[in-house]
Image: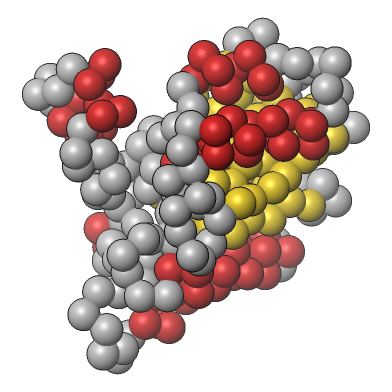
């Protein structure tokens, strides 16, 4: 059994929502895509990648191949464009089968696993994360760094031969859950607060999603915010 909740909000500072998402238990596919702010047509980029992912997974492609294919479709779409800055998007995707899970990501939209505690299983493709790994930045200061939104990888921006898709897989276990979100959530709500909401077994998955969206807005709502929660039983 899969229970899931989903939602997105434009936030309190933006006029357009460049996030998009997809949630389909029958296909076992869940994803969040965050069109790159400041670039032309970010909402077009995220929607194009979403639709490409759904098409490719439906036609039997693996999750990693679907991400590659979606990136190539976006690059082909923007090829020849006169825009100075290309369309770009992050992707955070989850694929569930009867007894296993697989995740893939590019950029800083995140994937968390819930198994008695919340653990981030994706790995931000960002300048700040690279500085932390190089020992040049205190992890405690990363969330306030002025360049925290600078990505090192993004679909539509990173060339195919330079694209590094993060991925992980494992066995599904009873009571395991997943959270997918754009950085509109993680910029405003810390992991401890997110974990307290995800742990609320007295609430349905949709109620937890609604609570997280409200928390992001209460923190200032500076960006578009998108959340998906998937519970397996």
Is residue 39 toward the left or the right of residue 122 in the image?
left
Which residue is situated farthest in the top direction here? 116
Task: Determine the residue located farthest toward the left in the rendered image.
Answer: 136
In the rendered structure, the answer to whether residue 145 lies left or right of residue 70 reads: left
Residue 105 pos. (x, y %): 46, 45
Q: Residue furthest right?
A: 1
Quadrant in the rendering for residue 59 = bottom right
Q: Is residue 103 left or right of residue 153?
A: right
- Rendering coords of residue 176 (x, y %): 73, 21
Question: Residue sitting at 85 percent across and 35 percent down?
Answer: 2
Residue 149 shows in the view: yes
Q: Which residue is drawn at 63% across and 55% down?
A: 21
Q: Is residue 27 above or below residue 51?
A: above
Q: In this view, does 19 lie to the left or right of 29?
A: left
How does the figure colour the protein chain or chains? secondary structure
Say above or below: 35 vs 149.
Answer: below
Name the quarter where the N terminus is drawn: top right
Q: Is residue 32 visible?
A: no
Camera-nearest residue between 114 and 68? 114
Spot occupied by residue 83 in the image (x, y as percentages of width and height) = 27, 84
Pick whichever, 74 or 57, lies toward us. Answer: 74
Q: Which of 134 and 207 is in front in this view?
A: 207
């Amino acid at each position: 059994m899969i229970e899931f909740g989903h939602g997105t909000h434009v936030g309190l500072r933006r006029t357009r929502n460049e996030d998009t998402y997809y949630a389909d238990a029958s296909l076992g596919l869940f994803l969040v895509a965050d069109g790159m702010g400041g670039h032309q047509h970010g909402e077009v980029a995220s929607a194009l990648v979403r639709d490409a992912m759904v098409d490719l997974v439906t036609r039997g492609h693996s999750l990693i191949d679907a991400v590659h294919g979606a990136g190539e479709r976006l690059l082909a779409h923007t090829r020849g464009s006169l825009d100075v800055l290309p369309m770009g998007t992050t992707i955070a995707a989850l694929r569930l089968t009867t007894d296993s899970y697989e995740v893939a990501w590019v950029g800083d939209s995140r994937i968390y696993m819930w198994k008695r505690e919340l653990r981030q299983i994706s790995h931000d493709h960002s300048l700040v994360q690279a500085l932390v790994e190089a020992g040049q930045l205190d992890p405690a200061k990363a969330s306030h760094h002025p360049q925290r939104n600078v990505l090192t990888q993004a679909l539509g921006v990173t060339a195919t031969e330079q694209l590094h898709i993060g991925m992980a897989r494992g066995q599904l276990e009873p009571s395991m859950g997943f959270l997918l979100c754009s950085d509109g959530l993680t910029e405003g709500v810390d992991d401890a607060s997110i974990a307290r909401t995800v742990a609320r077994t007295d609430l349905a998955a949709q109620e937890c999603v609604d609570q997280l969206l409200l928390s992001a807005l209460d923190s200032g709502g500076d960006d578009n915010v998108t959340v998906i929660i998937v519970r397996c039983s």
